[in-house]
């Protein structure tokens, strides 16, 4: 990144010696700083999310134990891993889709679109920031779940971050697609949020038994994450095929979602509804 | 002034990450004190034509722009074959009744609405062909106070939108201080925007548009909802900043006072077409009509009816034992009117002239078209 010295010019109202250009590094700093500020300044959303997630897990665990007894206890490790991945997925999905809807609602989307960078890099950076945030909150949820159930799991951080990260990258693609649909149809966000419950199906899909399920978002990653956290498989112990498929699914869905978003943005501009809410 | 072509050549040797995305190149050349800071915004495409803020290239050039919504018999033509050029450094007002197509025109110019026909060039850069390079020159306040992040503080907004607009916020910190000072926001810099009044939010919004490096600024209803004092401050500062920085400003507003006070030139839009394009003074001279306000106890209904036959009597008001009428009258009409009043034996109790203003011109020009619908 080149940096130019401050140079001459500009009006007396500035008193400055000119403006330096900002590249993607500066853009990333600005977007990530904003996300960090909002996270620290308004923690209620994050805390609320953790409390609700833990509450539902408590209902699931204690309620299930009352109904299913030992059967549930025997499979609790798988349930915890699945729930952990589900909370990550929901966080990643809503980070993108709800955020695009919010930008429309706030009237800031068009401002981003008409910048030298465009909105897509901003949305991606925000997605990355919210992934980090989601990992933090889901990590807390995971810790509470382990404490409540007295369960131990293999917690190889590198393996978990890579496998879970790639798994939910495919969900980011779904978030982009949902955000694009929101651009066109506006107040449809609540309906699209219902898709989050579909993630439960994907996370629990028997991808090891039914091969084609592995190309769906989350399904293959969920299987690998189970192996990593329950069986203690390390990232380098997975086969190239498994890792390749994980990457391909992640990139494929992210790319497809991005294409849908770009198409929807263009269509919204043609219909004149980009900034309407 | 270095051309963009020259700067882009230099920029190609730089390793600015901005060069990696969206087909855009950084404009990170050797400094030239004669450039505007906008020239050096971080991202802009390299294009062969000599473009950028130069005297001989219009800041905004619109050619044959049309936009229709819907299809078949229900289709609505929001912008109808609009062509206009706006020279750099001018402040242009865009007036029109509701539904005239002002917002659609602005959004079409900015590429937020894709036009069906026509082209737009900002400083010589085609918005459709090279949007990223064109957007390096432009910013807009399209949503009033809804243009910012309300949960960020005032200063955080200015810094954020400067960076997103391609300008290192540290390098324009002094400008931000000065803007905040001018808009009376210096004591609110660390206050989240959500905690400010409507007027202050509007000021923050405008300040954030001016905080980056844009040299073409579009403002859609910048004073909407503001009290008189805030509106006055805002338009005074807008004019001053525009002059000092050589900004090109396009202001869409229903507030005639704003347009009259701030703009060098006025475009009046009706049914998606430009029906008038001139300076405020020329519009008033060509289209404005002077009126006489006459008060007399002798203005009986019969006299008023007689006057109506040959003069345009705009208003009649009875009260306080006398009648007041407003008669549209150019200088030639005044003598004839006085003669007629004298023939009727009318003794004048009061006589005032009413100067035409932009609102009258606007109403006249757009009323004709309303009537022809």
Image (tube, coloured by chain):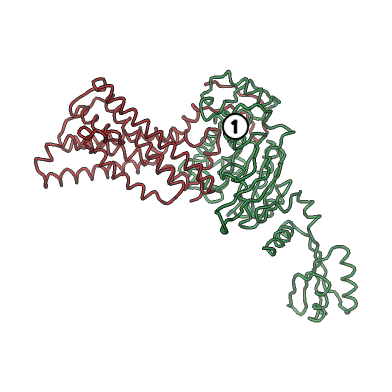
Decide: is A230 above or below A55. Answer: above
Q: Which residue is mark 1?
A: B133
Using the rendered view, name the quadrant where residue A87 is placed: top left
Quarter of the image where the C terminus of chain B is located: bottom right
Using the rendered view, name the quadrant where residue B239 is placed: top right
Tag 1 subunit: B
In the figure, the shade used to draw chain A is: red
Q: Is residue B140 left or right of residue B91?
A: left
Q: Residue A265, image x and y in percent?
A: 49, 42
Q: Nearer the viewer, residue A227 or B191?
A: A227
Q: Residue at x 11, y 47 (%)?
A: A67
Q: Nearer the viewer, residue B295 or A254?
A: A254
Q: Nearer the viewer, residue A244 or A274?
A: A244
Q: Is residue A27 left or right of residue A212?
A: right
Of all chains in the rendering, the one displayed in green is B
Decide: is B34 above or below B126. Answer: above
Q: Residues within 10 Å of mark 1 (few under 14, many from 20)?
A: many
Q: Residue A96, image x and y in percent?
A: 40, 39
């Amino acid at each position: 990144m080149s940096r130019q010295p401050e140079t001459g010019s500009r009006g007396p109202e500035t008193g400055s010696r000119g403006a330096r250009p900002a590249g993607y590094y500066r853009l990333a700093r600005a977007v990530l700083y904003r996300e960090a500020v909002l996270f620290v300044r308004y923690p209620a959303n994050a805390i609320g999310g953790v409390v609700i997630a833990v509450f539902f897990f408590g209902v699931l665990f204690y309620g299930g134990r009352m109904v299913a007894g030992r059967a549930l206890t025997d499979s609790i490790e798988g349930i915890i891993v699945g729930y952990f991945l589900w909370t990550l997925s929901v966080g990643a999905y809503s980070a993108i889709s709800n955020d695009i809807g919010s930008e429309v609602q706030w009237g800031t989307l068009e401002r981003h679109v008409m910048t030298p960078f465009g909105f897509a890099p901003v949305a991606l950076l925000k997605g990355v920031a919210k992934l980090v945030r989601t990992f933090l909150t889901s990590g807390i949820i995971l810790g509470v779940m382990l404490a409540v159930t007295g369960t131990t799991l293999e917690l190889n951080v590198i393996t978990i971050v890579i496998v879970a990260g790639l798994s939910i990258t495919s969900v980011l693609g779904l978030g982009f697609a949902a955000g694009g649909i929101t651009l066109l149809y506006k107040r449809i966000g609540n309906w699209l949020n219902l898709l989050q419950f579909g993630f439960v199906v994907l996370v629990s899909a028997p991808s090891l038994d039914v091969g084609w399920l592995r190309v769906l978002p989350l399904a293959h990653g969920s299987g690998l994450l189970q192996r990593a956290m329950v069986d203690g498989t390390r990232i380098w112990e997975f086969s190239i095929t498994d890792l390749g498929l994980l990457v391909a699914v992640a990139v494929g869905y992210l790319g497809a979602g991005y294409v849908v978003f770009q198409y929807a943005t263009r269509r919204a501009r043609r219909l004149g509804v980009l900034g309407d809410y | 002034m270095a051309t963009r072509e020259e700067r882009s050549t230099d920029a190609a040797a730089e390793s600015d990450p901005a060069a990696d995305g969206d087909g855009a190149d950084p404009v990170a050349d050797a400094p030239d004190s004669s450039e505007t800071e906008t020239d050096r915004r971080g991202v802009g495409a390299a294009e062969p034509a000599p473009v950028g803020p130069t005297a001989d290239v219009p800041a905004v050039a619109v050619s044959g722009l049309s936009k229709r919504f819907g299809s078949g018999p229900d289709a609505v033509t929001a912008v109808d074959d609009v062509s206009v050029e706006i020279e750099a450094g001018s402040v242009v007002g865009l007036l029109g009744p509701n539904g005239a197509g002002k917002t659609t025109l602005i959004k079409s110019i900015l590429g937020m609405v894709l036009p069906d026909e026509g082209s737009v060039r900002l400083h010589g850069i085609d918005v459709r062909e090279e949007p990223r390079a064109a957007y390096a020159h432009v910013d807009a306040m399209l949503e009033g106070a809804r243009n910012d992040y309300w949960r960020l503080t005032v200063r955080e907004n200015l810094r954020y939108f400067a960076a997103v607009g391609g300008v290192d916020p540290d390098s324009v910190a002094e400008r931000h201080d000065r803007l905040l000072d001018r808009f009376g926001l210096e004591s609110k810099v660390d206050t989240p925007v959500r905690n400010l009044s409507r007027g202050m939010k509007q000021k923050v919004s405008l300040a954030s548009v001016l905080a980056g490096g844009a040299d073409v600024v579009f403002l859609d209803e910048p004073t909407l909802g503001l009290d008189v004092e805030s509106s006055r401050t805002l338009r005074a500062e807008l004019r001053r900043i525009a002059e000092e920085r050589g900004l090109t400003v396009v202001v869409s507003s229903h507030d005639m006072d704003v347009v009259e006070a701030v703009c060098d030139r006025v475009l009046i839009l009706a049914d998606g077409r430009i029906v008038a394009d001139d300076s405020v003074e020329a519009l008033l001279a060509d289209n404005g009509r002077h009126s006489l306000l006459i008060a007399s106890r002798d203005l009986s209904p019969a006299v008023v009816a007689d006057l109506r036959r040959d003069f345009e009597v705009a208003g009649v008001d009875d009260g306080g034992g006398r009648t007041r009428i407003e008669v549209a009258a150019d200088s030639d009409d005044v003598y004839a009117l006085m003669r007629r009043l004298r023939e009727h034996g009318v003794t004048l109790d009061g006589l005032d002239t009413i100067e035409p203003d932009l609102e009258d011109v606007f109403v006249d020009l757009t009323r004709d078209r309303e009537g022809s619908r």
